[in-house]
Image: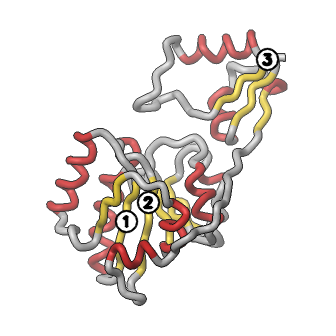
Amino acid sequence: PHVWHVHEILNGHPSLQSILPLPLLYESVNFLTDRAVTVSQAVSDELAGFVDPAKVRLIYNGVACPPPTAPEKLRAELGASPEQHIAVCVTSLQKYKGLDNLMAAAAKACARDEGLLFAIAGAGPLDATSALQQQIKELQLQDKVFLLGFRNDVADLLAGADLFVLPSTKEAFPLVVLEAMSHGRPVVATDCGGTREMILEGETGFVVPVED
């Protein structure tokens, strides 16, 4: 049997482009495959009208949960006091990840709570990184927002955070939300793709409108 594993929402995606028009692509999937496995209901909805519903199976992704080795490292790295709260975002530094909107929100949040810090882990294109650095400077957040670059100690970062934020404008099923939850961290994330399917509103976190 032929199984197609669909783990992205291509419609409107800013960086992933199909070589075929999407209707034709999905109709080809329907013709060629025995099963189409999706990672979220949002991805299943993307296939609706093109792929026979009887062929579609939703199987959520899981994540490994490595224990942190140095959960205190992040607070020491930022020079944060025990009274300060740290919001962590682990993502790629690309426009559609919504970091410009996060910075606008961070400026408002830090004005209300002077003890709040933001740590962003991830790498991206030079132009996107430079634009983010410039926005941080313009908003005078240099002592509130820290760009950590690419990290391979994500478990330590999440364990050292007080909450996790994900401001994306486009997602299918962001595994980093599950990773944050595996460390018991509340999540504030935008309502795109399958993110809503992971968060229990008001219990494990909050879902907010995209670009709000």
Q: Position of residue 204 (x, y in %)?
A: 63, 69
2 and 3 marks in contact (CB < 8 Å): no
Tell me the CA gap for discs 1 and 2.
6 Å
Please name the residue that numbered disc 1 is placed on: 119
Task: Name the residue rendered at 55%, 18% in the picture.
Answer: 22
**Residue 208, can we see it?**
no
Of 62 and 156, the residue lying toward us: 156
Q: Position of residue 170 (x, y in %)?
A: 48, 41
Name which residue type carries label 3: His
Q: Secondary structure at mark 1?
A: strand
| Quarter where residue 58 is shown | top right
Task: Name the residue rendered at 40%, 57% in the picture.
Answer: 121
| Quarter where residue 110 is shown | bottom left
Task: Name the residue rendered at 52%, 13% in the picture.
Answer: 21
Left/right of residue 156 with respect to residue 131 in the rendered view: right
Crowdedness near tag 3: few (<14), some (14–19) or many (≥20) residues, C-alpha within 10 Å: few
Tell me the CA gap for discs 2 and 3.
37 Å
Name which residue type carries label 1: Ala
Q: Secondary structure at mark 3?
A: loop
Please name the residue that numbered disc 2 is placed on: 89
1 and 3 marks in contact (CB < 8 Å): no
Of 185 and 189, the residue lying toward us: 185
Q: Earlier in the sequence, mark 2 or mark 3?
A: 3
Name which residue type carries label 2: Cys
Q: Position of residue 162 (x, y in %)?
A: 49, 75
Residue 50 drawn above or below residue 48: above
Q: Earlier in the sequence, mark 1 or mark 2?
A: 2
Tell me the CA gap for discs 1 and 3.
43 Å
Please name the residue that numbered disc 3 is placed on: 2
Q: Secondary structure at mark 2?
A: strand
